[in-house]
Each structure stands twice: as C-alpha cells, then as structure tokens.
Amino acid sequence: MGRSTRYPSPTLTTRNSVVQFCPAPVPRTVSVWYLSAVRTLFVSALVLLACGFAGGCADSSSRPSGAGALLVIPGGPDPVVLRVSRSGGLVSAYAYPALDSVLWRSSFRAPALDHVLGFGAEDGYLAAMDTAGSPVRVDLRVGTITVERKDTVSALSSADGSAVYALTNRGDLTRFTPSGGDWRFSPPLPASALFAQLDGSLIVAGVLGKRVVVWRVRPPGQAVSDSLSTDVGGEPQALAQTIAQTAGTVGDRIFFGANESVVVVSARDLTKVLEVDLGDPVRAIANTPSGDRLFIALDGDLSLVVVDRFEEGVSGKIKLPSPALDLRMDPLGRTLLARGAGDTVFVVSLGGDDVQGVVRSAWRGDLPLVLPDGSIALAQGENVVLAHPVTLADGRAIPGGAKDFWHALRWNGFRPRSAGLDQPVRFRTSAPRAPSDVDDSAAVSDSGVVPPTRSAPPPVSSASGSGTVPTPAPRVDNERSTVFTVSFATVLDEKQARSLASRIRVDGQVPRITTSERAGRTLYRVVLGPYPSRDEAERVGRASAQSYWIFRGAP
C-alpha cells in the first residue's frame, strides 16, 4: 500500500460579516495540475460560448440554423403596418406584429397606391403616389385622404408627408400642401429629379447637354438661390433617365447616377462632395439610413459596388448570383434586398456585406418589405409570407395579404390618450355665438373674415380622375358616422389664417388650414377636428378661449 499524503482541510473564515472560502496550501505539483485543468475547462467554455453566438459550430459554408432565434423589435416609436387594397379602399393600421387586429381605419377611401413618398411623424401626414401618377395625402390623425389631380405629373417628392412637390408633364414645378396647391415655378431648364428638403426648400436636378445642373428654389419665391453644374458626359437623354431612376436624398446629401458615374452633392450649399466613375451604366442605388454608404447596381454586373463617404470612393464589392435589376434598403439598415430575374430576390446582410440567401417574391412598389423585427414580407401568389430574418425560412402566412398595398412605419400617434389629458384648462370668456346664429350664405366682411358654414366639406377627388367622391366612406366600427368640426375663422389671406392657428392649442393640437372656393376666391378656414359628438366639439371650442362655430361633418 503506497504512502498517502494528507493535505490540510480548507476552512471557512468571516470578514466583515461575509463568509469566505480559504483553501489550504497545495503543493506545487498539485497546483500545476489544478491550474492546467481549470485552463482547459475555461477554453472549452469559451469555444462553446462562441459556438452559441454563431448559431452552431458548423463550417463556414453552412447557414446558421437560427431555429431558436428570437425575433426582436428594436425600441423606439411604435411599429405600425399600414395596409390598403391594391385596387383602393380604406387604409387600415396594425400594431405589428398583430397583423390580424385592426388598430385604426381611415374615414375616406384611398385610390390604388403605387409607392410611398414620405411620412411626417409630427403632423401624421403620409404622402404617396397612386397608380395614376397623382399625389395622395393620408392624414393618419383624422382619417381624411386627399388626391390632387389638377396636373399630370412625371415625378413627385416629399420630405415630411405634408408638402408634396410635383414635376408636371408640361415641365413646371408645383407644390401641394394641406391648404391646396399654392406655388408654381417654371424651371430654367427641363428637370429630371426633385429633392424635397425638410427646411421647405426644393432642390432640382436637370440636364443641359452633357452637363448636370442642380439648383435650389425656396417657395413661395421664384428665384434660384444656389446652383451647381458638373460635366459628366454621355447622351443627354440617357443621362436624364439615369438621374430620374436613381435619385435619392438622405440627411444633408443628395445623390444620383449620371450615366457611368455616381454624384453626391451637399444639400446645404450645393457643393459636389463626391463623384465616382464606375465604368458601367448605373442601374439602381440604395443608401444606408445614415447615408454613410451607397450600394450601386450596374448594368450587367454581378457585383454590387459599395461607395463609402468616409473613404470617398469604392470600399468594396458584393458578388451576387446574377445582376441586380433593382435595390431596396431595410429602414433600419440591417438588410439590403436585390431584385434578380423573375421572382428571385437576393437578401444581403449588411453586417458582413455578403449574400445571406435567396427568397421568392414578386417585386412591387411596396413588397418585398423588411419589417421592424427583421422578418421579410414576401408576395407569393395571393398571400404574404413572412421569411425569418436569419434562416429566411417561410414562416407566418397572411392569406390574401398580397391583395393589399403594404407600408411599415414607426409612430406613437395611435396610442390611446390618457384621460387626464382630456381635461383642459378653462378660461373665463364670453359665450360663443350659437350655430343657429351663423348665416351659411354670409358674404365676406370688410375685415376679410367669413363666418364658417355648417355645410359638409368639399368632396375628395376620386381615383378615376373624372369625378368626385361626394361622401366619405362609412366608418368600419360601430360608432356613429356623424362627426363635428370646430371652426375658428374663415379668411381670404393664408398668412392671417396661419397666424391665428399658431395662437390656438387645445389638448396639444394646433388647428389645421383647409381651403374652399366661393365666388372665384379661395377661402382659408382654421379648424380643429372632426370630433365624434357635438359635446366634444363644444368642449374643444370652449377650451380654445376663442370665438368659434361648430359645423356638422369633417373639414
């Protein structure tokens, strides 16, 4: 029997009322073995942890399993999906991912939509273009929809969903606002692309021979305040077409393809900050949300070219199985979708700038669409199928979903209001005139103010362009269809109307300006609403501390 060695037992001691484990001294030979074993276990744990983050320890050619990957929606404003029939109808809002429960519906019908131009979270306006090429504005606060069919347009742009700029087929530029089309401009040369800016200005790009000319106008002025001219070469007609197809804006920069080049211009002072010659005609451009990188598809090229603003040139290429015909960026900058031949869509992961896989979907103005949690909404037949963001495997199916037009946005405007917010501060003021005291046929007074009428609002233009929609579509809920609007004044001067509106705020809402025609003159009405009952409208009117009138119907 060999000699055994006894080691002192470990002890427990206390220090500052905390129990501590104090191991006994260990001979050097045992200590080396002990440290070696601990080191092996630690390395093994790191390997297993790395495999867990990578989705499994497979070779580099295998796709991550992602079977247990959770779909996570990043924080921020509420994720909302808007849907409307592709043939036109009521706009429905869903709190994603609850796509089977309607959160809100519009009061009016929308025409068949082609694509969205812009959205303003502050005012709740969504601007889009319909399949007939006309600008459409959806007011997500009150459910009204306006279609402008005064001109046939060839290009549209909107930065905030409120003001929509249009290039008419006659070559003029015009602006449509919630109060009407109030500005028209004849450009110094034919325009090819419009870039609406958040400061209210409009940047325009046109072609003069082999040169691209970029200029800025500030409505309602008619003067060109800044301009830039650059020689890019090539046929003028092909140059104008490339600019129209690839133009885009992000942050303080605008960009467009110019034959075989990509040009980036500073929107602040219209200086050219980048021009890259790519050697082949530019077909499509997509930008990251920050604008730091541009992804360019070239005619007949299997690779997407990546242009980096910090490297001021080409920073890399992403090889595709076949040339890309069009590009679409994830609003959060995680995924890039590239259109292949037929119904093939290549999914490019921007984390590694490589092709993640291939999915099947019809390519439309709205779909395929990357949703807030990274899932990809695919149009497959009459259904929409949500592909997993990691595995790209078909997941949830929405029967008949492909019959709708889809759009995703982030907005808190559909949240229910706290009851405490609906208790306004009350002011001592004279009682307003009763609605019966208002004469609907009153003429314009010497002060330029017209007493508001109690008649229904002007009809909304129809989708066909040949008639009007005389009445709004019935509400889809069980509430009464009768609504009431608070009117504070009707004036002949838009500036006077806006000045009055800026002085009124009730429940955090500022009045809107609507327009109508009477005896050949444009009247500007300052209104709040509509509200579901006369009592609610009266409450809002009293809380405004202004003279007001109540009329039945939406503004």
Image: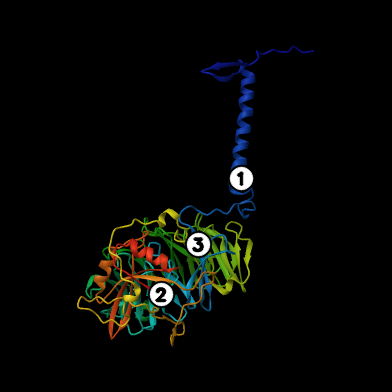
Q: Of residues 460 and 444, which is closer to you in this image? A: 444
In this view, which residue lies farthest toward the left? 446
Give the left or right position of residue 456, taking residue 17 as reference.
Answer: left
For label 3, the residue is 80
Q: Amino acid at mark 2?
A: Arg
How far from the left and from the top, in percent, is residue 114? 48, 75
For label 2, the residue is 552
Cβ–Cβ under 8 Å for marks 1 and 2: no
Cβ–Cβ under 8 Å for marks 2 and 3: no
How far from the left and from the top, in percent, is residue 464? 46, 85
For label 1, the residue is 52
Q: Nearer the viewer, mark 2 or mark 3?
A: 2
Quarter residue 375 falls in = bottom right
Crowding around mark 1 (Cα neighbors within 10 Å: few <14, some 14 to 19, many 20+) is: few
Q: Secondary structure at mark 2?
A: strand
Give the left or right position of residue 422, taking residue 198 as reference.
Answer: right
- Does the rendering let one see residue 175? no
Closer to the chain start, of discs 2 and 3, is 3
- Does the rendering let one see residue 318? yes
Q: Secondary structure at mark 1?
A: helix
Label 1 – label 3 distance at C-alpha: 32 Å
How far from the left and from the top, in percent, is residue 240? 36, 78
Q: Amino acid at mark 1?
A: Gly
Q: Of residues 147 and 3, which is closer to you in this image? A: 147
Q: Of residues 522 and 395, which is closer to you in this image? A: 522
Quarter residue 247 falls in = bottom left
